[in-house]
Amino acid sequence: MDIQGILSTLLPLLPKVLAIALVFLGVISLLYTVYRKRGGKRRFSIAQFVAGYLLVMWFGLVMMLTTFSRGANFEGWVNFRLFSGYRSAWNQWSLSEFQLIIFNMMMFMPLGFLLPLLSIRLRRFTPVLVVSFIVTIGIELIQMLSGRGIFELDDIFHNTIGSIAGYLIMQAILSSMAKRKLDFKSTGLALCIPMAFVLLFTSALAVYQSKELGNLSIRPAIKQNMSGVEVKLDARLPEQAKPVSLYVNHHIYNLEYGERMATLVQQSFKLQQQEKRIDGMNRIWLFDDSDGHPYTFSYNLQDGGWQVYGESGDEMKLSKEELTRHRAFYEKWMLDHDMLPENTTFSIQNEDTLRWDIREPLDAVADGEMDFANGMVMLMPASTDGGAPRDLFYAMNQNEYVRKVEIISPAQAYAQVLGGNFYVYNDLKKGDRLRIEKYALVYTYDSKGYYQPVYRFVGTVNGEQWETLIPAMSNA
């Protein structure tokens, strides 16, 4: 989930949390009044009451966002691998995951920022560190025990760092107010954590931009622990491999291309843009036609494909003559905008869908030294001639030949499996039985649109179907 998705989840929760915090403040005020009437001498300032109220509100928002807004789908999962989130964000080159790292720190900044206002004792570093550590561990335990989240060491680290950052900012403010001028020493300390992460992410960007090839999301953030896992191989694996071709697709991770296609659809079918947003790896445009019917355009960064569809959901069967007429219109539209390669195969599905396919055999892809197209287009025509299609799914890839590259052998790729260097949704554990039945050299796109060779291993884990991809390029 990216920052926009988090905020869209957070905003509807604010009224509920505000009401709960007000009730809590009322109860505390009543108890304090009773305490004072019975001779209690300890006084609390308005600043302490406000800080306490804001902390209750903050805690409610955090619990709603991290726990209560989720389903119990995680079955007590834990992740004790520190910085695995960084590796995952790097492998996927995912803006959403980088944003999540930053948000996990920012989410706890109010804790460290407000604690010094509650008590003089909490204006020292050690008590704030201890309280922050206990609070974030408590939240992670609640998530794990309720099955509504994963107990992650990364979250504890980032939450605690964020709270300390908030504490340092408050210390700079209090120190500057006491001196009646800017305290450069405390202000410098307050800037240390933000600047460290700015330097970290800037360095990652510089390294990424200096590389020719992109990152592969198939690489695991953490290795599997293969001790106690029984592995059986049913395939013969060659010890040598010949060079194969490398390609690039300029439509992948290309926001300009996504914008261009969204604009083309909008202008071609006279749609009006209402909203634009981010949803993970997708960039979403919301349109309306002249009659107010909504359409959604979605561009996927990872594969360069896009889709536009109306949200009416109406089914419509068309005659052969109608389908022929619609085919002529939409096919001309795609050809005019260089969207439909030559030699595509046309077919009709379910009496309502036009389809164009072109497939290049994998052997020809690996051995070839020329550009090629691969993929499909599926289109459900509009009810009226020339209108926006009810559904258009465009997954036609234009791949440019780059050069021949050296790859590791299937046996070397298998050694990566034995070492646990592969991705699997549920971690393997002692006693599991992994059976590898076959392998194949296939291709996948990296984060810069390069069509890289990878090995696909197929088999079973404890009798259930399983497969994984291992990077094949020897210098990647």
Image (spheres, rainbow, N blue to C red):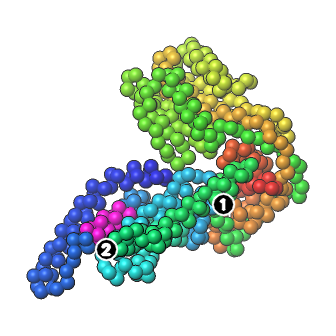
What are the residue bounds of the magenta stretch?
50-62
Q: Say which of 293 and 434 sits in front.
A: 293
Q: x, y percentage for residue 443?
A: 74, 45
Name which residue type carries label 1: Pro
Q: Is residue 111 left or right of residue 380?
A: left
Q: Residue at x 42, y 25 (%)?
A: 289
Query: Viewer-nearest of labels 1 and 2?
Result: 2
The image's mark for residue 117 is: 2
Crowding at dot 2, Cα within 10 Å, few <14 / some 14-19 / many 20+, comes out as: many
Amino acid at circle 2: Leu
Q: Position of residue 232 (x, y in %)?
A: 76, 64
Query: Mainly helix, strand or loop, the magenta region?
Result: helix
Circle 1 sits in a helix, a strand or a loop, which is it?
A: loop
Spatial CA span between label 1 and label 2 = 43 Å
For marks 1 and 2, the one nearer the N-term is 2
Near-viewer residue (454 or 302): 302
